Every structure is written in structure tokens, then in C-alpha cells.
Image (tube, rainbow, N blue to C red):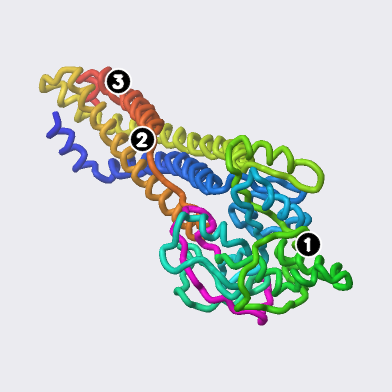
Amino acid sequence: MIRFILADLRRLWAGALVVVLLVTLATALGVCVVLQERALRLGSARAADKFDLVIGAGGSETQLVLSSVFLQPSPLPLMPGDVLARLAADPRVDWAAPVGFGDSFSGYPIVGTTVALADKLSGGFAEGKVFAREGEAVIGSAVKLPLGGEIKPMHGSAEEGGETHTELVYHIAGRLQPTGTAWDRAILVPIQAVWHIHGLGAAEADAEGAEEAEHDHEEAGAGHDAHGHGHEHHGEAHPDAALDESWTANAPGLPAILVKPKSIADAYKLRQDYRSGNTIAVFPGEVLTNLYATLGDAKQILVAVASGAQALVAASLVLVTVIHIGQRRRQIGALRAFGAPRGAIFGIVWLEFFTLVAAGIGFGFALGFAAALTLSGLFSQTSGIAMPVGFAREDLALAAVLLGFAAILAALPAVLAYRQSPAQALRA
């Protein structure tokens, strides 16, 4: 029987190839959707796990997390600088790191922050050390710049017509270990250096220039105006100045503060305390849960589209198979005339068709995995977030369902061949 099937497939190789390709493409579409959605969930969840609590000014919780955790450029409102001073002095806080956005270099976002965050973000340095002066920077593992290289900050981005700061040139002091987050593509610099080149810090204490400084820092923290250009006041740079991270109530306004509580109980208490007044406090994981709900709806739509495509392929295969059986009536009649039992005819036709569909399902899983891997790689290059693509136990259930459907589908032409009498076949 096996020899007969192989000989038949070699003779009808073109039709067999079409069947395999149709099943492969239909299966790959569904598998790619499932794997890509799972990779996005896992990657974003692991990235959010790096940060316990995010505090910002009143506004969108989702945008606060996207900007501070995933470093997506977007204007954020500023909260008073005394919030940072209170958090730094709070016994429930292990460390609190302000973050400031708005500048970039060679497509990499520059984030103003503290030694604590730069030192603890990845758990160590691949090379070099943490910044110790205003003119030093630390780069993520995916930033393709050499140690000791120069970084000339640009307000906004080159695509948006950003303006390069001439007050300060950072020198790369260290490279972080990979974190699997968007921070792997970030350039970390001292927050006080960001304040100084934007005319903040000491200028805040000057009542005469306070209003102008606050306007300028809104651009430094939030990114740029609606036209993509920052109209900022240039301050004085102090590249050799030592870092002073003893925060006071006179600190400039901030778009976000990343907080590491000392315990889970402290995290919930801090979240409650800073969810009133002019601030909001969020757990990134909670915000992602809401995003996952939206993502789940999108996944259902994509799965429905993939299922529709698979149903159309199945219908096409049935039509092709019925026509194929009609064309092979004389061959089937000859086999019956030479004494082949009906069961053998059923087995030959069923096994031949099932083999083709099963091969298509196998190739479809391989192609879907390769497509998801490629898409995740492209997304990881642009976002810095590691996207783990892999099969899970529920994928075995999907494969079993598809193979079961293939077995039922293959039974249709087999039944047609089974019910065909030798006399009718030879007269055709």
C-alpha cells in the first residue's frame, strides 16, 4: 500500500504540491498570530517586571507606563520636584529614580536618571562603570557605540528637525548587561546634567527666571511641542561636576519617578498615598493587564481571520479532492476488478490525502514559527524589548485539532472511493 501511495504521489506531484502549499500557508497564518501575540505578552510583562512602581503627574496611566517603562516618546505633564524629595526621604522606599526624556542621539533615546537606577537596572555592567560626573553616560547593551565614545545630545530627533545641544558632550563610561527591555536601547545620563543643559537646577531658585525655566523643562521632560520642535533655553554645562543626588524640595519638575519599595506592603501603601492630589502611582503590570484586554480583542479578530482562511482552504481541498476522485474512477475500478477489497481502497485514498494535509500542517507550524521569529526580531530591534517566541503545551492541542480535522476531511474522498463499484468505474 505504501509503495502504491508513493508512486501515485510521484505521478501526481503537481497536485500534491498545491495541496501541501495551501495547507501550509493557512496553518502558518494561524500559528504566527498565536505565537506573536504570546511573545508580545511575555516580552512586555518581563520588561514591566523590572519596575515595581511608577509615579507621575495626573494624566493617562497607560501613557505614563509606555513613556517611562517602554520609553515611547510622548509628552507627559510634570509633577512638582518636592515629590522626589519626599520619596527619597521615605523609609518605605529603597530607591527612587527620576527620569527625564526629550533628547536623543543616533536614534537612541537619552534618559536622564540617577546612579541608583543605572547601577541596578541590569544587575551589573558588561564593561566600564556607572557615570560619576555630569559629562559621563551609560549605554544599554543594544546601543552600538564604543566605550569612551562621544554623545552629542539632540533635543527631539533628527527626523523631527531636532536641535543639537552644544553645551555638553557626554562620554560613555559603561555598558549595561542585557535586560530584555526597551532600556537596552537607551543612553542613560545624570538627571542633573539634563537639567543644567536645559537651563534648570540652579535657575529654579531664581525667582526671576523660574517661569521660563519651568516652560523649558516641560520641553525637556515631555519631549517636544506639537510641531516636533523644542524651543528651549540653553543652560550651562558642567561636564566635570560631581553628582549630587541629595534631592530637595527645589528640584525641577519631573515627568516620572521609578520607585523601588522595600516590600510588597510598602508598594501598595505608596501606591495609595500617591494616587491623590497632583500625582498618580501605578503598577506597570496592572496597566499592561488593561492593554492585554485590548490585545486579546485584536487577537480574536486575527484568529477569526485565520480560521476563515483555513475554512476556505478546507473547502477548496474538498472540491479539488472530489474532482480528483472523479478523474481516478478508472484506476479505482481497475484495482477493484483485480480483487482489491473496499477497505484497501478506502485506506489508500484516506492515507494519501491525510499524508498531504498532515505534511502541510507540519510545514505550516514551521513556517509560522519562522514568521513569528522574524517579526519578533524586527520588533526587538526597534523597541529593545526581548520577544520570546516558542511553542507551549496548548499548541499541541491546536496541532491535535488540526490533525483530527484533517483525518475527517480525508475520509470524505475515501468514502466516495469506497462506495464506487468496479463496473461503474470501468464504464466511465
Instruction: Please check the rendered image and state whether residue 229 is part of the magenta-colored stretch, yes or no.
Output: no
Foreground pick, 137 / 183: 137
The amino acid pointed to by label 2 is Val
Foreground pick, 423 / 292: 292
- Label 2 element class: helix
Q: Residue at x 55, y 35 (%)?
A: 300
The amino acid pointed to by label 1 is Asn
**Quadrant in the rendering for residue 320:** top left
Q: Position of residue 285 (x, y in %)?
A: 59, 40
- Label 3 element class: helix
Which residues fall within the magenta stretch? 160-186
**Residue beneath disc 2:** 320
Q: CA distance from mark 2 to mark 3?
A: 15 Å
The amino acid pointed to by label 3 is Val
**Residue beneath disc 3:** 415
Query: Residue 398 vs residue 261: left or right?
Result: left
Query: Residue 110 vs residue 414: left or right?
Result: right
Quadrant of the image containing the N terminus? top left
